Image: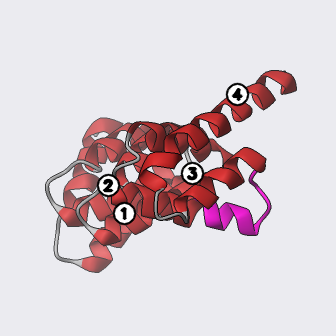
Amino acid sequence: MDSKENIEDLLSVLAGKDGVARQQARKDLVELGTIAVPFLIKALTNPHTRIRWEAAKALGTMRDPQAAPFLVQALSDKSFEVRWLAAEGLIALRRDSLQPLLTALIEHADNWDLRQGAHHILHAFERVDLLNEECLAVLDELRSLEAEFALPPAAKAALESLAKKKNNDV
């Protein structure tokens, strides 16, 4: 059996009712590593909540930066549990999650679930001193009652400061 068939078989187990089998399938997908990431990213949009939950959990465990923009999208999932796991996955990615998160805040500041997830993520980063001054300003705006309006400029300034820092590190 080739890897693609194996991955698809494991993904089908994620939809099942057997929790032990789902957990084992998720662990097997994590062990497959990078080759499984695109399949798990696709699973984040599956109509079945259980599959989205398992995909978010696996991607958070894998800590693959290519999943970051898709985990940011999952912060808007209709399921609180999926949103929570997406946020936890982004926290695990640390700085690799900042650019896609800030970009989403610029583009979708009106999305309550996104703002809630971003607050959780940035607050976690604040506790471990991972945020520069501009990112701290974004967190302050997320705490504001007027976040929907003040957030995009703050997120844009933070994104620009991250890009500037990255260019200076080269």
Q: Earlier in the sequence, mark 2 or mark 4?
A: 2
Q: Nearer the viewer, residue 52 or 125?
A: 125
Residue drawn at (40%, 55%) of the image:
114
- x and y, in percent, of residue 10 in the image: 28, 55
Residue pointed to by mark 1 = 83
Q: Residue furthest right?
A: 169
- Tell me, yes or no, whether the highlighted magenta stretch contains residue 155: no
Mark 1–mark 2 CB contact (< 8 Å): yes
- x and y, in percent, of residue 41 in the image: 35, 43
Inspect the image, locate mark 4, and give the three-letter code of the amino acid beneath it.
Ala
- x and y, in percent, of residue 34 in the image: 50, 40
Residue pointed to by mark 4 = 163
- Tell me the quadrant of the picture where the C terminus can be found: top right
Inspect the image, locate mark 1, and give the three-letter code of the amino acid beneath it.
Arg
Mark 3–mark 1 CB contact (< 8 Å): no
Q: CA gap, disc 3 to disc 2?
A: 20 Å
Q: CA gap, disc 1 to disc 2?
A: 6 Å
Q: Earlier in the sequence, mark 3 or mark 2?
A: 3
Q: Nearer the viewer, residue 37 or 137?
A: 137
Residue drawn at (68%, 49%) of the image:
135
Inspect the image, locate mark 2, and give the three-letter code of the amino acid beneath it.
Ser
| Residues in magenta, as a range | 122-132
- Tell me, yes or no, whether the highlighted magenta stretch contains residue 124: yes
Q: Earlier in the sequence, mark 1 or mark 2?
A: 2
The image quarter containing residue 154 is: top right
Inspect the image, locate mark 3, and give the three-letter code of the amino acid beneath it.
Arg
Front: mark 1 or 4: 4
Q: Is residue 120 above or below residue 68?
A: below
Residue pointed to by mark 2 = 76
Q: Is residue 30 above or below residue 170?
A: below
